[in-house]
Image (cartoon, rainbow, N blue to C red):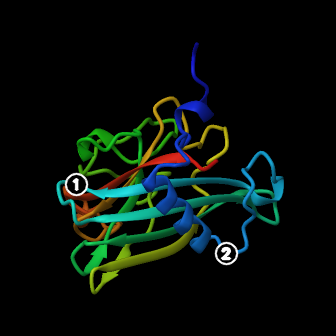
Amino acid sequence: MRSTRSDRFSIRSPGSPTRTVAAVALATVLVGAACAGPGENPDRGVIAEAMIEGCGDSEVSGLAVFRERPSAEGVKIVDLSLRVDGLPDGLHAVHVHETAACDPCSAAGGHHDPGPFGKTTPDAPDFNHPFHGGDLVNVEVKDGVGSLTTATSRFTLSDGRLSVFDDDGSALIIHTNPDAYCDQEDELAAGCAGGARGACGVLVLAE
């Protein structure tokens, strides 16, 4: 039987230790959200999460929680709450990448960018950066702990042309360096979008 989008990108083991940790963190970063699943409480919106692990460093871990909501004008807004532990202090680039794979982290592909010109080559000169659908702002790590709260209208969690839950899903990548946003022509060089990949987490729908 062919799996549905919800089947392929949902967490299905509510009793596992990893899922328990994620659930506690989810409740913490989404204070006031109802406990019912998205289908049971339309006011809650669509929620997804990514359990973050280091790209070769087992000391790196974290959780990203995404919540989609409509703006006053009906535009879909995605709120992101991110915590990551174990990365070096400083700014680190954060992007949603085009494939739901983190083993190895390079398997996540380029930045999520489902526009008419296709998806991008990772970490290469690219005139569309920082305007890809998956481009986000830097997270700052202090004393080994990084946290970020931001919002974007560049991608959605629900079905549609901008959805991160397309045929091959998506992953959140945190890079080892900051994103310089490459907005000047002389900055368009490999590494300007954050360099090597430091951590990765596959996006899944929260049930």
Report the amino acid beneath label 1: Cys
**Residue 169, image x, y percentages:** 48, 37
Q: Which residue is mark 1?
A: 55
Name the foreground residue: 141 vs 26.
26
Name the foreground residue: 195 vs 140.
140
Q: Residues within 10 Å of mark 2 (few under 14, many from 20)?
A: few
Element type at mark 1? loop
Task: Choose top left, top right, bottom left or bottom right for residue 181.
Answer: bottom left
- Mark nearest the camera among 1 and 2 is 2
Q: Tell me which residue sits at (34%, 44%) in the image.
A: 110
Name the foreground residue: 122 vs 37.
37
Element type at mark 2? loop
Q: Residues within 10 Å of mark 1 (few under 14, many from 20)?
A: many
Residue farthest to the bottom, as pictured:
143
Whether residue 123 is visible to the viewer of this picture, yes or no, is yes
**Residue 30, image x, y percentages:** 63, 70
In the rendered view, tell whether residue 200 sits above or below residue 204: below
Task: Choose top left, top right, bottom left or bottom right for residue 138.
Answer: bottom left
Left or right? Give the position of 70 relative to 197: right
**Residue 170, image x, y percentages:** 45, 43
Task: Choose top left, top right, bottom left or bottom right for residue 188.
Answer: bottom left
Q: Tell me which residue sits at (76%, 59%) in the image.
A: 44
Q: Earlier in the sequence, mark 1 or mark 2?
A: 2
Q: Which residue is mark 2?
A: 31
Report the amino acid beneath label 2: Val
